[in-house]
Image: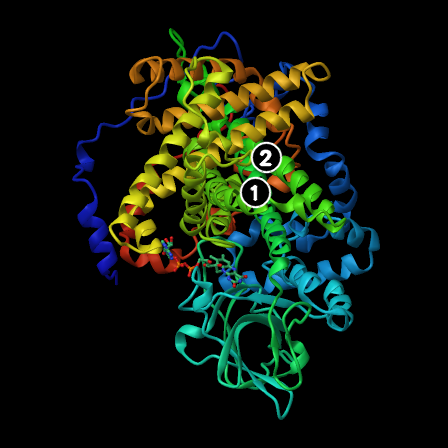
Amino acid sequence: MFKCSRFFVSVLLFVPRFDFFSIPFPPLLPSFPCLTCDRFTTTTDTMNNNDGFTSTILPKERAGASFDIAKLTYAINRNHSKIIEKFAPLFDEELFRSKEDDVNLSYEDGFRKSIERVTRAFEIVRSNPDFMVAHMRQKIQMQQFFDHNGVFVHFTMVMNYMFSHADKAQKRYWLTKAREGDFVAAYAQTELGHGSNVRGLETTATFDRSTQEWEIHSPTLTSLKWWPTGMYACTHALVYAQLVIGGETKGLNAFMVQLRKADGTLMPGVELGEIGPKMNTTSSNIGYCRFTRVRIPKDWLFSKYSKVSPEGQYVPVPKKLSKFKYISMMLSRVAIMTIAYDMCARAATIAIRYSAVRRQGFKPGQTTPGEGEHFIIDYKMQQYRIFRACAFSYCLLWNSRYISGYIKRVQTAINDGDMAAADDLPELHATLSGLKATATVQAHDCIEECRKCCGGQGFLMSSGIAKLSPDFSEWVTVEGEQVILSLQCARFLIKAVHTAKEGKAMTATIAYIGESDRPFDPSSPAGIIEALKLRARHLAKRLTEQFDSLRARGMNFDDALNRCAMLAIKAANAHVQKFMYENNEIAIEQFFKKQDTPAINTVMRRLLRLYGLQTITENAGDFIGLSMTVPLAAFMESVDRRITVLLDEIRPDAVPLVDSFGFLDSQLQSTLGRYDGNVYEAIYNDAAKKNPLNSLPNGKMIGWDTYKSILDLDFIQETEKKQRQRATGKL
Ligand SMILES: Cc1cc2nc3c(=O)[nH]c(=O)nc-3n(C[C@H](O)[C@H](O)[C@H](O)COP(=O)(O)OP(=O)(O)OC[C@H]3O[C@@H](n4cnc5c(N)ncnc54)[C@H](O)[C@@H]3O)c2cc1C
């Protein structure tokens, strides 16, 4: 019998008080007379009721582009799409093709499937050296071909660490095998009780001089390694631990530790598990691990820089190497920005293509469904939201390209012996910390907004957009949590304001803090950057004033910064947004000179202005009290008017702009964002019809034989007799 669970009761209690019987029946649908199409001219028989009538829309949108789509795609991807097309057939097997059915698998089956795919993918890759070379040269990423379920960490974070921190002998021993994937390691830093506070990690590595070994130990519950991606399916891990010699702690170092034996079971003293389902759909391989007096050889401490002699003498990392530390951290932040670009651009592509084919709301005087309705892309608020994601994607792309080019030039100069080339790296590093936070938080916001812009269909997993937001969310937290990184950036802003007050020279990224406010015309392009500078400068100054007054009252540095943390985050954000805007402007001039590619230059500038003006209007409160040539209300009104004009200007290029990102349908895996625009056919055929709940003959409901016990089957049979289907023929 039906059991009334507590959940069900609470649902009932919170349902608005509707009287179902008082809802009028919907009026009978008229047979619509249609002058422009034959969709509704007959009732059933001659109508093509499996056509969504959208196939001609996107080609028309593309034909209206003001610029050459292929040229912009090439500038973005070079021949990336061609490389993907070249290697894609390698993975054209049922195992990889059946990805859209993953959503129907249990957690355990999903993991099994992903391991099957990873195993098969490794076999394929090993027999295709071209693929390996392209991957090592970073021309392709694994996830473009198969779902690696966290194994990528071995090939990125772990191998990068080994490249820079293993000595020659260690590289010989570990690296070749690591490159081939002969063993797989996780990056085990975070612990159950310690994430952002890395110095607080508790795992210990104690040196035993008598055996020339390290003893790796988890002394408390909070010291269990927790969260390492890929760890459940690992054989080894790069483990961060407090190095202890003779009872003295020397600080954090990284060690190689074996977790699993060749038979798949655990090494003695190792307890390892998977932490359980997470909010994104693809992570079923994140681990936890406890070490109980696990012994490893002395030379499993990565020893290129920090060394320990056989007698137990510890030599820490030399100070001058900190510049290299900055560079590798900065490159990893830029890499995350590229991921943010990739995911945000996918969301923008799906939302803009779908908005271009989806119609809602009758045009004045029209009543014909479809033809008589507006495309939702023509609604201003829809444009504001989806073009915002498109503009921000381009901003992320050009910033990541411009900044990584800059860092690589500095890296080359340092390698050539010019250490002065790295003088402004600490400042750039601080800005990039803030940039990682702002870029990921804002990209996540844009992705989720694009999903909402797809209305109900955006809720379907087959939309491809529903999973982007949870899948991307981890990047806001990993590799530096948003608040922690923004606070790092804010510390540097406080220092910069002090430097400006002292009248000392300032580097390019921060010089605006020392400049005086200039009058500007808010509707001009130059006015946007002035407004962004004004906002960032005054927030940095207000932050420094608050911070200095707390310090003057005797508060220590950390407590004072914590006290004004809300303002600190705002100041960091404003600084980063100004920085991104300026970089984007330089990048456009570098990559699309007006005289060479005028049409692309124009459309890129429009997007940049949109990004700048949306930043201003969404942070209007930051301008209160600032002296400007026009009153704040008039200023904001002119900003909003300019945004509306920009939306009109961008509209004809919206589809071409997202096409230019160059995503293949096989990458987007989206019923809504298909290149051909046939969304309704896809939602019906590719998603609903393949749903396993719809698999029984004659549409029988799964679970019916249980469910029927609560129903009055006699009554259902009685009403069954009163309804019928008419035979074919015109009515
Ligand atoms: C999907 C995923 C994959 C991961 N993969 C790995 C991996 O491969 N290897 C690995 O080692 N780790 C990994 N991590 C862990 C990740 O690096 C940490 O989650 C991250 O560093 C944040 O630490 P935390 O979880 O302890 O958060 P906490 O530090 O506990 O943060 C919680 C809250 O406290 C606030 N807070 C903390 N400290 C401060 C402060 N000083 N001032 C102000 N506010 C503060 C934060 O802003 C946040 O809002 C992964 C995490 C996720 C979600």
Outermost residue toward the bottom in this view:
210
Viewer-nearest residue: 194 or 35: 194
Quarter of the figure with residue 166 = bottom right
For the residue pair 540 and 266, the one nearer the viewer reads as: 540
**Residue lying at 30% horizontally and 59% vertically, measured from the top left:** 709
Secondary element under disc 2, as helix, strand or loop, is helix
Whole-number angstrom distance, CA of label 2 to CA of label 1: 8 Å
Mark 1 vs ligand 1: CB below 8 Å: no
Please indicate whether residue 97 sits to the left or right of residue 39 in the image. right
Contact? badges 2 and 1 (CB < 8 Å): yes
Does residue 288 sit above or below 595 in this rendering?
below
Indicate the amino acid at tag 1. Answer: Met
Q: Which residue is labeled 2 in the image?
A: 399
Q: Residues within 10 Å of mark 1 (few under 14, many from 20)?
A: many
Q: Which residue is mark 1?
A: 337
Q: Position of residue 458 (x, y in %)?
A: 45, 37
Of labels 2 and 1, earlier in sequence is 1
Q: Is residue 272 left or right of residue 162?
A: left
